[in-house]
Amino acid sequence: MSYLAVPLPASLFVLVDKDGFDLGPFRADLFAILEDGTMVCAGHGGSPLYLRIVDVDGDWITTLDGTGEAFRYRIVVLDIDQEGRASMPPPYSA
């Protein structure tokens, strides 16, 4: 199966699911694109993240895990203040 390799934001971003839980932060330059289109991030200090993207709808992506279960995430670019601190933009911020 081939997956969609989508352009990722150049700045820090997180992946937010429908319940508001987020994964990340990530930087696009930490992702490698495998031959089948899988996007893998292993350089962020945690367990590798595999994005096997099968659908894109605006800011939302649908990705499959290793068992084929589908997950939907919204790509959210983080706000960076003048001191370099990252925060979630509204409506995600508390």
Image: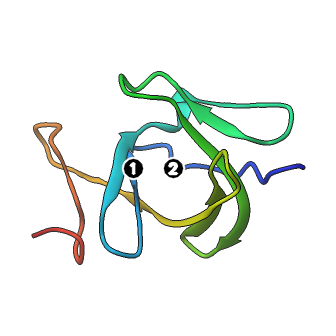
**Residue 52: image location, x then y, percent:** 69, 49
The image quadrant of residue 19 is: bottom left
Q: Is residue 38 above or below residue 60?
A: above
Q: Amino acid at mark 1?
A: Phe
**Residue 43: image location, x then y, percent:** 46, 21
Relative to 51, is 10 on the left or the right?
left
Relative to 4, is 94 on the left or the right?
left
Query: Are discs 1 and 2 less than 8 Å apart at CB?
Result: yes
Q: Which-is-in-front pick, marks 1 and 2?
A: 1
Check disc 1 and report the residue beneath it: 13
Question: Helix, strand, or loop for circle 1?
Answer: strand
Q: Residue at x 15, y 48 (%)?
A: 81
**Residue 39: image location, x then y, percent:** 67, 39
Q: Residue at x 37, y 49 (%)?
A: 23
Residue at the right extreme, as displayed: 1
Q: Residue at x 45, y 37 (%)?
A: 27
**Residue 91: image location, x then y, percent:** 23, 78
Residue at the front extreme, as displayed: 67
Check disc 2 and report the residue beneath it: 9
Colouring used for the render? rainbow
The image quadrant of residue 44 is: top left
Question: Helix, strand, or loop for circle 2?
Answer: loop
Q: Residue at x 43, y 28 (%)?
A: 47
